[in-house]
Amino acid sequence: MATESTQILCTDCDFKHVIDHRPVSLVYNFPDKQRWTTGRKFGWCYHCDGIHDMEPEVRAQDVQPRIDYLKATMGTFSYKLGAFLGRMSGERPKEPGQLRDLELQLKLAKERRSAVRCLACGKEGALPLWDDKNGQLHHSCGGQFYSEAMEQRGPAPIFDREFIYLDLEGNRVERPDTKA
Ligand SMILES: [Zn+2]
Ligand SMILES: [Zn+2]
């Protein structure tokens, strides 16, 4: 299988970083034992002076409209009829699960006090790459980062998915007891 990786380069210096696409899941643990699992982002960390995995930013103003839209959809007659007919043939509608997921995101966004963290050093203030808000990130040399797709030679490395367990503030916690 032909694989591609991404390298991040700087316009003004010879900075080069190859993004490592190994699968990583972040598992946020709520005090009431609920969990929300999501993916990580790549970002620039000023503390580490490098590109690392970071937390995604979850903002209530992004999540709330999706909840409202989903609830409105689920309230329509055609949705209810479809869900009813689906259940008759043994299908489970996916929207209730999506709604639960979004409601956990909203809860996280509302309770969270700290900024997104770099997952390498755990400090706040990592800036996501490819984020419209930040535009192209400036490197300390004064240059800007840009990305380039890279043909990977040889077979793609196989990585096991890594699970990182976090509390609501993005601090790493021990893997919680699943039976609890
Ligand atoms: Zn540079
Ligand atoms: Zn860092």
Image (cartoon, grey):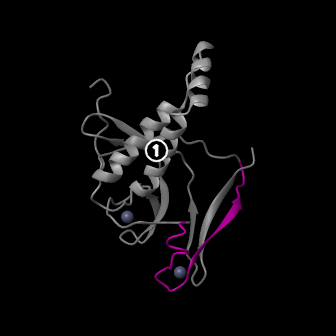
In the rendered view, would you say 60 is above or below 142?
Answer: above
Residue labelled 1 has its Cβ within 8 Å of some atom of ligand 2 = no
Instruction: Please give the name of the residue rendered at 61% of the width and 81% of the height, measured from the top-left corner.
Output: 11
Location of residue 43 in the rendering, given as x and y in whole percent from the top left corner: 47, 64
Q: Residue at x 51, y 45 (%)?
A: 69
Question: Magenta segment: does it hold 26?
Answer: no
The image shows residue 78, relative to residue 151, as above or below, that is above
Membership of 138 in magenta stretch: yes
Residue 92 position in % (x across, y down): 55, 22
Q: Is residue 169 visible?
A: no
- The outermost residue toward the right is 2
Q: Position of residue 120 (x, y in %)?
A: 38, 58
- The structure residue drawn at horizontal position 49% and vertical position 56%, both measured from the top left corner, is 41
Left or right: 29 in relation to 24: left
Q: Pick whichever, 113 or 172, lies toward us.
A: 113
For the question of whether residue 111 can be seen, the reply is yes
* Left or right, 38 with reference to 7: left
Q: Residue at x 63, y 61 (%)?
A: 6
Element type at marker 1?
A: helix
Quadrant (top left, top right, bottom left, bottom right) of the N terminus: top right
Query: Would you call the spot at circle 1 few (<14 residues within 10 Å), some (14-19), or many (20 or more)?
Result: some
- Height in image: 140 above or below 163? below
Judging by the rendered image, the residue that carries numbered circle 1 is 67
Up the image or down, 53 lies above or below 25; here it is below
Front one among 117 and 60? 60
Q: Residue flagged by tag 1: what amino acid is it?
A: Ile
Residue 8 placed where, x, y %?
59, 68
Residue 48, by quadrant, is: bottom left
Residue at the front extreme, as displayed: 77
Left or right position of 115 against 68: left
Range of the magenta residues? 131-154
Image quadrant in which the C terminus is located:
top left
